[in-house]
Image (spheres, coloured by chain):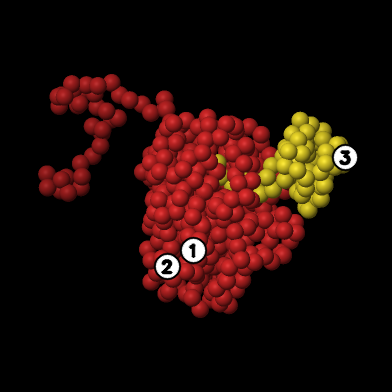
Amino acid sequence: MTLHFSPELVGEPVIHRLGHQFALITNIRRADVSRDEGWVVLEVEGEADEIERGLRYCEALGVRVDPVEGELAV
Amino acid sequence: MTTAPARIVGLRCRACGRGAPLGPTHVCELCFGPLEVAYDYTEVAPLATRAAIEAGPTSMWRYRMLLPYEAEEAPVSLGEGLTPLVHAERLGEQLGLRRLYLKNDSQNPTNSFKDRVVSVAASWARQQGFQVLACASTGNLANAVAAYAARSGLRGLVVIPDDLEPGKVAPTAVFDPVMVRVRGTYDDVNRLCSELADRMPWGFCNINLRPFYSEGSKTLTFETCEQLGWRMPDEIVIPVASGCQFVKHAKALDELRQLELVEPGRPPRLTGAQARGCAPVATAFERGETHIVPVREPRTVARSIAIGNPSDGSDVVRLARASGGVVTAVEEEEILEGIELLARTEGIFTETAGGVTVAVLARLARQGRWSRDATVVAYITGHGLKTVGALEGRTRVPEPIPARLRAVLAADPGGLLEAGQPAARRAAG
């Protein structure tokens, strides 16, 4: 998945919490984070339900979560 | 994994350069970057001559040597590509451009550019033994997938959000694909399809078939240069949705130059066009950054290019900048005026995405971006009948008059009585 961080969230340890509060193993594959904003391509391992819960947690914080490939068409 | 023909080396990651075997996969195992088809151009070169191409089919498949399809069987085709490159003299006159050209891709079989990419995806999928050709889409892509699935004998699968208007479903449903309506937004549908592509042996054009699908885009630029007498234009104006098409036009120009198919010269500036209501790429360009901030709620009539999280947005910004182009966004009123301007001056009716392209072209021309003799090409990627509702309330319907000669002359519709006689009739009189 790709996580997009807005300026309000770029200082939050979201990925750390994702690994601690949920039974998930996270691994950063690619990232571009500046002082103000950024994106992280994250590999996440775990049970499907747990991944879903983690994903919803991120979204509730205001992090945008997308499939790794982004959108190609509407 | 399949055995690749010699001219196709395999897949390669655009982000980290790592190679991958040819197969239905779209992200790099190492960095999750986008995978592209890589060719051995020493193998391609003997096949890619002007004479061979000009003697090829009257479709985009005349460029088969630069597409990832090598079966003996004919590709899945409805005659896509080799669309007209129109010398837009009347529009050019209004914009101060003597050499303005429009690549009219609304003339494709399902009336949009998507036929090019889906033709390649369907051909590759059938060759590989896929039985299902699928996509997540609400518009032009769904239309093309359904048509090419019907043409190829593959089962078509189109996944759409449940709030899609019936009017948008019908032109796709007529091809009889399997339609799955999902309760949720387009984002939900997109995510669901990514999961499906991981688990099911289905070919999703915009997911696991993407490296092959996207190669079809190159043919638009190949043809443009061929139709200009194997010359490159000075600038190309391209609508930007995911940015995938834009990136492939840059690749096409590299290939044309590397294979010495085009006359030497400066490569064109590549300029992107977006609607301000969903302009993540233009915004990044204007801010001087490459990071794309996704747009959560696109708000524009140009729905076919309203992609909030464009897959190749950062690459578009980089390529536009490197080529000397720009990425510009236009307002809603400009988009509709763009559609009307093109129709009025050239007799071409384009969808809202084409309105965006024409509006950007017009804005840049009025700002004096080009000299009068610059060769500028704009890509018109879809037909106006696809978004006819966008013009509701803008067309003037005159009051009816009696069916009598005197009534017509008295009404003098549009000042036609001022129009002169044809030259031949004047001479005879």
- x 23%, y 39%: residue: B420
Q: Which chain carries label 1?
A: B
Dots 2 and 3 on the same chain: no
Badge 2 density bin: few <14, some 14–19, many ≥20, Cα 10 Å = few
Disc 2 versus disc 1: distance between alpha carbons?
8 Å
Q: Nearer the viewer, residue B400 or B386?
A: B386
Residue B135 appears in view:
yes
Across and down, in percent, residue B39 comes to 59, 70
Chain rendered red: B
Q: Name the residue under label 1.
A: B127
- x 78%, y 45%: residue: A46
Residue B219 appears in view:
no
Across and down, in percent, residue B260 comes to 54, 73
Dots 3 and 1 on the same chain: no
Numbered badge on residue A20:
3
Q: In this view, does B83 lie above or below A48?
A: below
Chain rendered yellow: A
Query: SS for tag 3?
Result: helix
Q: Mark 3 lies on which chain?
A: A
